[in-house]
Each structure stands twice: as structure tokens, then as C-alpha cells.
Amino acid sequence: MDNKNLFALSLAAAMTFSAPEEADAQSWKLWQEKPPVVNSMVIPGNERVGGSLSNLTHNGRPVGDSLNGKYLLVYFGTPYRLPNCSADLLVINEGLKTLEQRYGREVAARVTPVFIYPPHDPARQPAASNLSSYINAQDSRFIGLTGTHAQVMETARNFRARFMDGDGDRGGTYGNHTRFTYLMSPDGKNLAIFPGDTLYVFIADQLALNLTRDGVIRPQTGNAPGAER
Amino acid sequence: MANAADMADLGQPKETLSQKFNKLNHLRHTIMDFSMMFMAIGAVVAGAGPLVGILDPITPFIKMHFEGWLMAPDVLSNFIPDAMTNLEAGTWASGIDPVSMHEMHGAAAGAEAAGHAGHAAHMGLEAQNAQFTQWVDGMSPEQLSEINAEARDIYGMSLSEYHRANFLDHAQP
């Protein structure tokens, strides 16, 4: 058997053994760097998730009932340590952009992304960052809400979110927090939960489905899901 | 009278001892490669049974030799001529980002990590497990029970999935 035949035989053997799910070399590389860990990109809404945001403040002013009647995408995080927060907010931002591209600005304006963060405490966050520029860098539609430590922690608990090393009196930096995004209806019901590793298209699709169901997107006049294009 | 085969050999240089050795060396390399692959399969089968992770050790083998094939057809046009050139030069590699032999050893030694191919992924799992253990150890039994119930009832996740979905690598500044 000469060299070329040997090579062809080996190549054929390799092709025979190759696993189809690993055909995408880039996906394979990403998988090695960070294995997928979440078993779902969209978690069904839960009636035990949610609560009033009226006791929090936006730019120092009480929120009150200013968010009533809006669809909300609620995310708990911290502007003080950003690695995954910023990525998650970008995904939310892309989801809203996609919704706007599909159904127009009016429809997208019915959804308000909300970033809830603990108050700045020099003992917990040695380096404060400029929250305003941070949020605006994500999307101008984001609004940042905060309050006292106790208010923010209570709100987080109502949403089943957690600041692991900010809970209780253990100190810490708020750095470890859950990465879920909660889709809330105008009447405060939890419609869906998106894990931190979700994709923006899942956010856009869930918004579209719920807005269509509620009549905000009209199938006969727009590009609603299922409508003729 | 010379026959056709004899005529074809007229004027052709005879194969040198070095060329013969090179051919033998190619064959030896190939046998070694296949031996390693089947040793890796054997390790996984011994560790996890025949139906679990059977393809795992094969994938690094394919990546080691045929990295370019996975990105066909973009790379294939370069891959085969390069591989043939290297083959003729007495080496057995595609020349396109070959995975080191150490990676292959990692796959063979990591039978306990069946379902996760390759040394790097195996090491990543160890780091994740260490973070998870540290996270659990830092909680009181009551807190652990509460989070466990919440992960299951609200998010439909196991405790480890909940941890990895939320906290993995997030404490880094």
C-alpha cells in the first residue's frame, strides 16, 4: 500500500467516525471554552415571581406608578462589576432592537427594560462607576432603579433573584448575582424568564408572542407571528 | 525479449534505503495513531460502559489529524495538498493547527469524564466543580435548601445548573 492509499484510507476512516453534532468547528471551540449549562433558553413564567417596583427610585425620584401599564424586562445586576451584566444587557438590548425592526417603534416602545441595582456603598464597591453612562451605553430605553440596600434586596427576593454576597449582613461586593431576565406583563404578571445564556431572538420572539396575544401587534395590519409577509 | 513491465522499469532509479525507511516510518506512525485511538476508546468503555461517550476519544483524533476537514470546503483545498506535502516529507500531520499529542493523552486519561471530550474540557469541569463546591460550602443548610427549592420550582434547574447559569466566572472583576 503506497502513501497516498494509506492517507485516503485514514481520511475515509476519520469521516466515518465523525460526529455530526460536532461538525461546526466554531461551536466546538466555544463548547470547549464554556460548555452549555442551561437546559432551556426560555423558562415559563411563574406566579410566584414579581412584585411592586414603586418603592424604588429612578434618578433620585420615586418610581411610584410610572411603570404601570408597561411590559417590563427586569434584570437585577450591579454597575460596579460588569463582565456578565454588560453582556446580558446587550442581549436584552438586541432583543428589543429586533422587536422594533420587525414591528416598528410604537410596538417596541410598549416594553421598558429595567435595570435594578443596589445602592452604592464604598465598603462594598470600592470603585463606583458612572451608572448613567453605563446604562445609556446599553440602550437609552433602559431605566435604572435603586433604593436602600433593604429595598433592593426585598425586591430581588420578590422576583426570586439573588445578590449572593450582598444578602444579609455578610458584606461582599454584590458581584455574584443571578442573571435572569424577567418579562412582566402590564398588570405585573410574570410571563417568561430568560436565563443568562439566552439568545436575543428568544427575547424578541417571546415579546412578539405576548404582544400579539394582547392585541398590541395586530396580525391583519402588521407582521405579527403567523401573518402573511 | 523484455516484457512491458521490464520496459517500464528501464531508466527508473531504484528506491533507496532511506526511502524505504521513510515508508516504514509512515506506516509505524499510522499504526501508532490508530492504536492510541482504540486505546482511548477502550479507556472510555472500561470507565463508562460501551454506550456512553463512545465517540468522545475519536473526536480529538479527528481534530488532531483532520482539523481542516471540519471546516470544509474552505480549508479543504489547502488541507489535502498540505497533508500530502507533509506526508511526502516524512511527517504525518495536516499542518493546520494540529492538536498536540498531550491533548490526546488527556482524552485517554480522562475516561472518568466520559461525555466531555478532550483534556481542556475536562480541566474546565474540574474548575467548575471546585467553584460549585466552594459556593455550596459557603451557605447554611437552610439557605442551601431554600435555593435548591427555588432552582427546581421556579427555574426548573438542578442546583448545579442554577449555579453555573448564574455565578460561574461572574465574581471576577
Image (cartoon, helix red, strand yellow):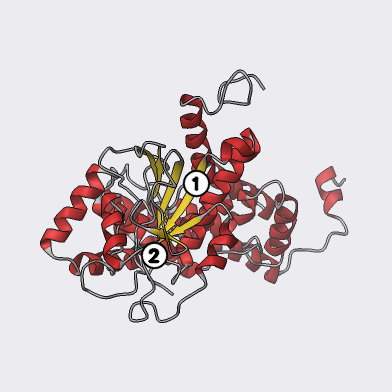
Identified at 55% across, 25% down, the residue is A225
Crowdedness of circle 1 by 10 Å Cα count: few (<14), some, many (20+)? some
Q: Which of marks 1 and 2 is in front?
A: 1
Q: In which quadrant is the C terminus of chain A drawn?
A: top right
Q: Mark 1 points at which residue?
A: A112
Return the residue nearer the eye: A132 or A192. Answer: A132
Residue B36 coordinates in the image, percent (x, y): 44, 59
Q: Position of residue B37 (x, y in %)?
A: 44, 55
Chain letter for the residue marked with disc 2 in the picture: B
The kind of residue tagged 1 is Thr
Tell me the amino acid under the disc marked 2. Answer: Gly
The secondary element bearing badge 1 is classed as: strand
Q: Relative to residue B127, is residue A183 depicted above or below? A: above
Chain under numbered label 1: A
Q: Mark 2 points at which residue?
A: B124
Q: Which residue is drawn at 53% across and 57% down?
A: A29
Query: In the picture shown, does residue B95 fall above or below A74?
Result: below
Q: Quadrant of residue A174?
A: bottom left
Residue at horizontal 57 percent and vertical 41 percent from the top: A109
Residue at left 47%, top 68%? A82
Alpha carbons under labels 1 and 2: distance apart: 37 Å
Is residue B35 visible to the viewer in this orientation of the structure?
A: no
Residue B162 bears which disc, if any? none
B111 and B35: which is toward the camera: B111
Question: x and y percent of residue B16 in the render?
Answer: 73, 68
* Element on which disc 2 rests: helix
Q: At which x and y percent is residue B63?
A: 55, 56
Q: Is residue A35 left or right of residue B72?
A: left
